[in-house]
Image (cartoon, rainbow, N blue to C red):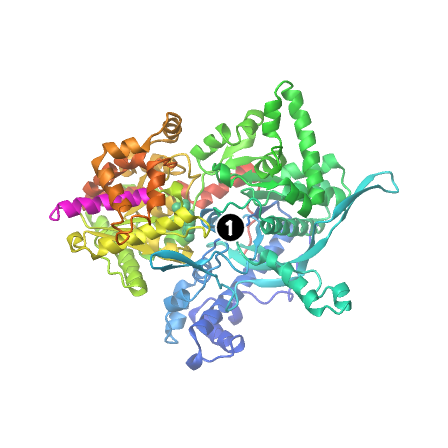
Amino acid sequence: MPARKQSSGTVPPGPEHTRTGLSAETLRQAFLDNLFYIQGRFPEIATDDDRYQALSYTVRDRLLHRWVRTIQAYKERDPRTVCYLSAEYLPGPHLANNLLSLGIVDATREALRGLGLDLDAILDHEEEPGLGNGGLGRLAACFMDSLATLEIPAIGYGIRYEYGIFDQKIQDGWQVETSDTWLHYGNPWEVRRPGICYDVRIGGRTEHVTDEHGRLRVHWRHADLFRGVAYDTPVAGYGVETVNLLRLWRAEAAEDFDFTVFNQGDYVGAVMRKVRSETISKVLYPNDEADSGKRLRLLQQYFFVSCSLQDMLRIFATTGRPLAEFHAKFAAQLNDTHPTIAVAELMRLLVDEHGLDWDEAWQATRHTFAYTNHTLLPEALEKWPLPLFADVLPRHLEIVYEINRRFLDDMRLRYPDDPARIARLSIIDETPPKYVRMAHLASVGGHAINGVAALHTRLLGTTVLKDFHDIWPDKFQNKTNGVTPRRFLMLANPGLADLLTEALGDGWTRDLERLRGLEGLADDPAFQDRWRQAKLIRKAALAERLRAGQGNAIDPASLFDIQAKRIHEYKRQHLNLLHVVTLYNRLKHAPDADVPARTVLFGGKAAPGYAMAKLIIKLINAVAEVVNRDPDMRDRLKVVFVPDYNVKVAQSVYPAADLSEQISTAGMEASGTGNMKFSLNGALTIGTLDGANVEIREAVGPDNFFLFGLDADEAVRTRAAGYRPYALYERDPELRAAVDLIAGGHFAHGDAGLFRPLVDHLLGRDDYLLLADYRAYVDCQDRVADAWRDPARWTRMAILNVARMGRFSSDRAIAEYCRDIWNVAPARVDG
Ligand SMILES: *Cc1c(COP(=O)(O)O)cnc(C)c1O
């Protein structure tokens, strides 16, 4: 039943009204009103935070109109809706992006100027929500941006962590973690919805009974009960009226006090119970920790998934359609295995709570879900120890067993004489203590499985999910990642964006393929000049930021060679360092050598429990300390660590790069999106044939990409053939000199023990094949230096990179998901 059209008067008047108008004058007045009525301040005594809050509420008011109209439009048309289930979102600062989406950057700047205020200073004040670790959470945020911009009805579901990813400080060269305080000053972008809340039960046991109709029913006698409350953040499409919803759940106690405890006089005990409930959404887990036994993480996953599915069922009930059609209303995407318990939870809700029979429920479930795989690393494929799973989710374990029983019965018919294969396919890993394999549950419980780059999807089907590919080849799809050009080009690099618009018109902002029009300008000397000018401005801005932050003087004219991403051995920041040390050695031996000035910048956080990654950070800073102080380097080589890499920092880093380091061991990076953000901002890539690098190289052309190293198949063969890194070390004098310098304590004030674990690993196992790729990498860096000496050639390559990056917009990725997996169409919201 379609909802009635809202009668006039229920919604505040539209943007023509002064309360939420978009002119500089109404913005100025609204800002002053909010400063007064929300912050209780007037301009003379307002703090930076008061101004930030007042401006944010001013912008939020304007979003609310579109938001309400979007909800009305969706209610009327009842379209199929995408539900993106993700344990992480890394949206970055909201204010600037919302100004951009609303098209009021200039009007706001003018309004504030009239009050003697600087917009950029206010923007800089925002503390971003760090509700993700890196690429996966950032992908979810890019997808939310594209869904809204493409006018697709969508809800992003996740967790409102009170503490997001830790803040990184560098002390004595080491990473030190401090707790994130993003909510300290309040969050003007979210709307708490106390009325939208759900009970989430855990633990206890099940009872199987026959009801009065002779039906088998299962009662879950839970041990504990929490409540999830919705916090909604608007997600505005760019240049359209659509404002979608990011709905994050906060855990609370189901009741403020536990009255049974309270009545026994244990007031403090009762309150403690409340505190314990709230720990569920307290903190984001940093990744790369050996964590399969972490009960709290399983609780977090179940908590947000259960709230989200109950919310979807509530919305579904308003359509008046029969439950067996649930999948016709919702397409739910599992962003990695973290939300995969949703498969069992939807079955439980449909069968136990709503009385559907198993087959009907299974039909709806399978057609609702689809699964995105993000990793081939076996240690990152989630599996839960069975005893833990049984303890937390006893009913779900029964459901998983039933799903598995039916699945394996089918498979035994198909493979009657292959018990080993059946064991490999099983959702339960039977090796003690036994595990629930979440990737298997996701593969069985959904209708599509996708990888995030062509190479990754191919490897997925031939390695970790090969058995599933054998049975369901058509279920596998590739969806190469993309990034939003709004945040990572328009916002991050306004100078380049203006130049593009001048050359091409502004259509590229919503149709990135139009960048191809730049090809004809690649050799135009005047255009090249302006291109270099735009790049230089971003480099100078980053240099200034670093000088202000750390007192590091760096030369914007030098080649900015940047590797910014999580620190991980497979990403090989230490291979980059071996090159830096090699350059250092060359300059020490030939101080007058004619080498172009290079500034090598690193940024990224290491998981707090990942000792080797933290040692790599220490080594970067140790090398920086020696190199930057050495007069022989004479500003031809500098090394800088950019602390606390997050989205805000990223927006100043990508546009400043000349060279993008994408040097992971081939076959290990699923896609990467940093590679796309760099290239879209006119950096050239030095990279391996890994993840989306393969497709970027194909798109920009092999001549405009610095390729080196083993490919994924060669890497496998190298390992299989008895790889001996020590022999390579002995054979290559430059490699040997670089390793020896690190091993001997040259960068550790003579302490030969400090970097020993790192060196021992390289010379012993070298799991990530650094030594195998070292020579190719260093030689390739020499080709980079040669190209850099010829500015016309370099600039031409950079322009062609940008011209051919259209395919890597998240708009393209989302359009493919809509067409091939979700079967959803735009629902336009009228202005
Ligand atoms: C894009 C992005 C990442 C992912 O970078 P990769 O190079 O793909 O690993 C991580 N962190 C932030 C803040 C990002 O913006």
On screen, residue 764 above or below 3: above
Q: Residue at x 49, y 64 (%)?
A: 181
**Residue at the farthest left position:** 592
**Residue at the farthest right position:** 212
Asked if residue 593 is among those painted magenta in the image, a careful observer would answer yes
Query: Is residue 640 visible to us here?
Result: yes
Q: Which residues are magenta?
A: 573-595
On screen, residue 377 above or below 307: above
Query: Is residue 708 visible to us here?
Result: no
Residue 47: image quadrant is: bottom left
Q: Main secondary structure of the magenta part?
A: helix
Of residues 82 and 468, the one nearer the viewer is 468
Q: Position of residue 534 (x, y in %)?
A: 27, 54
Q: Position of residue 822 (x, y in %)?
A: 57, 40
Q: Residue at x 34, y 54 (%)?
A: 653
> Within 8 Å: ligand 1 and the Cβ of disc 1?
no
371 left or right of 115 in image = right
Of residues 332 and 408, the one nearer the viewer is 408
What kind of element bears circle 1?
Answer: helix
Asked if residue 380 is among those painted magenta in the image, a careful observer would answer no
Task: Tell me which amino acid carries mark 1.
Answer: Met
Residue 92: image quadrant is: bottom left
Q: Residue at x 31, y 42 (%)?
A: 575
Dot 1 corresponds to which residue?
A: 144
